[in-house]
Image (tube, grey):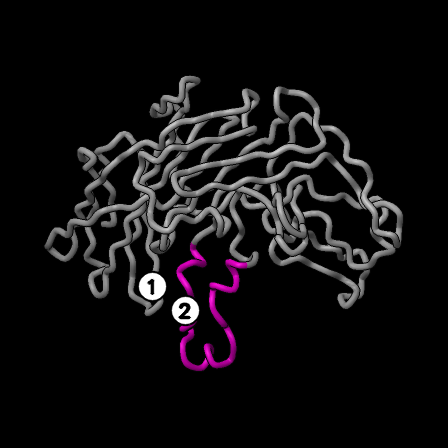
Amino acid sequence: MWRIRNHTPYKADRGWGRDKDGVHEWIVAIKGTFDIKPDGGVTLSDEPIEPLLLPEYTGEPGSSSLRYDSDITGQKPTTDILLNATAYAPNGRPSTNFLIEARVGEIHKALRVVGTRTWSGGLLQGFSEPEPITEVPVVYERAYGGYDHADPDPQNQQMDTRNPVGCGVVAKAGYKEGQPLPNFEYPDGNTAKAGPAGFGAIDSFWSPRREYSGTYDHAWQQSRLPLLPLDWDPRSLLCSPTDQQPGSYLRGGEVVELTNLTPQGRLQFTLPKAYFVLRTRIAGRTVEHRSRVATVIIEPDYPRVIMVWQSVLACPTDVDYLDETVIREKAYI
């Protein structure tokens, strides 16, 4: 019961979920790990990564940034595009100010990298001179945000719910001296207003994901519990920044261009294409279903790209009679 027979070179796993109305969902994730060659070619890796059932963090869960979200989720409304990367100064020369850029199909995003700085000048709220840097990891710990709980009184504390693990947020001006400032910001606009600048995954309790999760109030307890709230939005399943969410699912074949995210300065390759047919035996019948590209994770420091294809099959009444799902790869159309 509930078996997977995987006839592909990719890794696969499965799990159960429920939709907004409580209908059971049979979730299958197919995960491909691809090495990026110096000439931009992409080949299946000899070290494939298994689908994740639980999130993984850069450090202590809850107090560090999310590195990978679970691959077993409800149906995402589009593809998550993520980068786990390092910023490299152009030509390897220490710099206090340069741009990093990523293009994936229709998505184009640029961030400004600023040398390491701190608050200075006390009440004048000035910045120290940035120190030249050669490379720096692109993580939310180095983006605008933070949680200042130095004062034991909660009324004198401050948190940026968009990025509680970041830097730059200080509850009182008098506490700013020597506190770190972000290395990453958007090229235009006020840093605090523009929010945390990064390419990586956003945790489920960070804004704006948490607002999409719905309202769990007394009315929900009385009329919906244990179902999801009526205002639950499937965008809560997306862990990428909103400006990294394409208007429609990626299909593979999209061109990826990275600037100053490798020591060489530029990396270009094309996302692999794969097409899967899944056949699930349930209650004595066979149901055929397809998959969509749910997640693309680009990691130029390896260099590699990880792709997750997801299929979600609604099973209103036959959960106990689901036998197995057979996965096969077909020629891409």
> Quick check: is 282 in the magenta stretch?
no
Q: Is residue 245 above or below residue 327?
A: below
Q: Residue at x 25, y 59 (%)?
A: 314
Residue at image mark 2:
228
The quadrant in which the C terminus is found is: top left
Q: Residue at x 51, y 80 (%)?
A: 218
**How many other residues sit within 10 Å of disc 2, few (<14), some (14-19) or many (≥20)?**
some
> Quick check: is 218 in the magenta stretch?
yes
Q: Is residue 291 above or below residue 46?
A: below
Residue 279 visible? The answer is yes
What are the residue bounds of the magenta stretch?
208-237
Viewer-proximal residue, 224 or 173? 173
Q: In the image, 268: left or right of 205?
A: left
Residue 13 visible? The answer is no
Q: Check contact, mark 1 vs mark 2: CB within 8 A.
A: yes
Q: In the image, 99: left or right of 9?
A: right
Q: Which mark is residue 19?
A: 1
Q: Position of residue 98 (x, y in %)?
A: 64, 32
Q: Position of residue 106 (x, y in %)?
A: 40, 42
